[in-house]
Amino acid sequence: MPEEGELRRFEYHEPKSLDEASELLGTLGEGAFILAGGTDLFVEIRERLREVKHLINIKRISDLSAIEYSETSGLRFGALVTAGELEAEPSVIRYYPNLRRALAELASIQVRNRATVIGNICRASPSADTIPPLIADGASIETFRPEGGRTIPLAEFFAGPGRTVLEQGEIAIAIIIPPPQQGSGRSYIKHGRRKAMELATVGVAVSLDAKDNICTGARIALGAVGPVVLRAHKAEEILIGSSFDQNTVERVAEQAMQECTPISNVRSSAEYRRSMVGVLTRRAIELAREEPA
């Protein structure tokens, strides 16, 4: 038996292609896990939170480290792109300020230089920093499987805490974010007990399109206040077609509070989380109006 704090034994695999990696996942079954950054995975192995029998390292598979941006197709980045790399990417700095803010608030700089963004997403934590801005920006996730991959809207990717819709042998390989429209604005605000290296107690991301001070499109994503990151659809409906006057923004914030389903835990009560959804939604809308993409 391994002593406390000691890693359990597992078999290590280093496929050279996605086909090989997918086959390994499919045949090895339960207990087989993908290794990309490993910042969460190795902690979970050490703390006995995840029983790993097979570790499949995908770092030697080509074409998973690319970051590409175009004005027509938007941003696409692969499964091996780290949070630090994406945080420093010029197109992210210029066009996706909400995502960049989320990346800058993710753990420590040491973790960001190793952790992959898609790894953070596939962990499927409702308090993950990267998920709310990506959902608010209409991102999709590309997958690989031998019979043909899928492009799944990120808002439909999560099946519950720690669970995704990935099938046996299916691998998440890239994220695609549409390009911003002229007059759009984006923001992400995270609230926690500390100012750094803290899981979100509440996270709110907003992506707005506007013309002549009238909202023509809106996405509001709420993190850490439900089993998955939530879209506040009814709140968005109030905003679309309206001006950004104080009364409208208050109604939107109130509706967002009604749409979330927070729980109480050691970090916060459900009542406090719900209240903060209203506060952060108001602030996020104001910030998005100040920071056009």
Image (spheres, grey):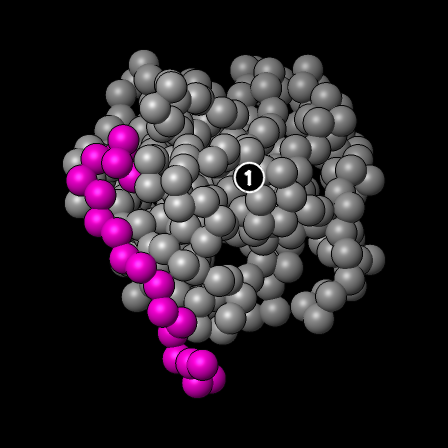
Give the number of callouts: 1
Q: Nearer the viewer, residue 141 or 189?
A: 141
Q: Is residue 22 visible?
A: yes
Q: Residue at x 26, y 52 (%)?
A: 13
Predominant SS of the magenta segment = loop
Residue 49 vertical placement versus 19 (above, below): below
Residue at the farthest bottom position: 3
Disc 1 packing (10 Å; few <14; some 14–19; many ≥20): some
Residue depicted at x 26% and y 26%: 69
Helix, strand or loop at label 1? It is: strand
Q: Quadrant of residue 281?
A: top right
Q: Please tell me which residue lies in front, 228 or 166.
A: 166
Q: Quadrant of the C terminus?
A: top left
The answer, for residue 112, to whether it is visible in the render is no
Q: Amino acid at mark 1?
A: Thr
The quarter of the picture where the N terminus appears is bottom left
Which region is colored magenta? 1-21
Q: Is residue 217 left or right of residue 271?
A: left
In percent of width and height, residue 279 lies at 71, 49
Residue pointed to by mark 1? 164
Taking 261 as reference, is 105 left or right?
A: left
Name the foreground residue: 279 vs 91.
91
Residue 62 picture location, percent across and down: 17, 36
Q: Position of residue 18 (x, y in %)?
A: 27, 33
In the image, residue 15 above or below residue 220? below
Q: Name the residue located 39 percent from the left edge and 40 percent from the top edge.
A: 27
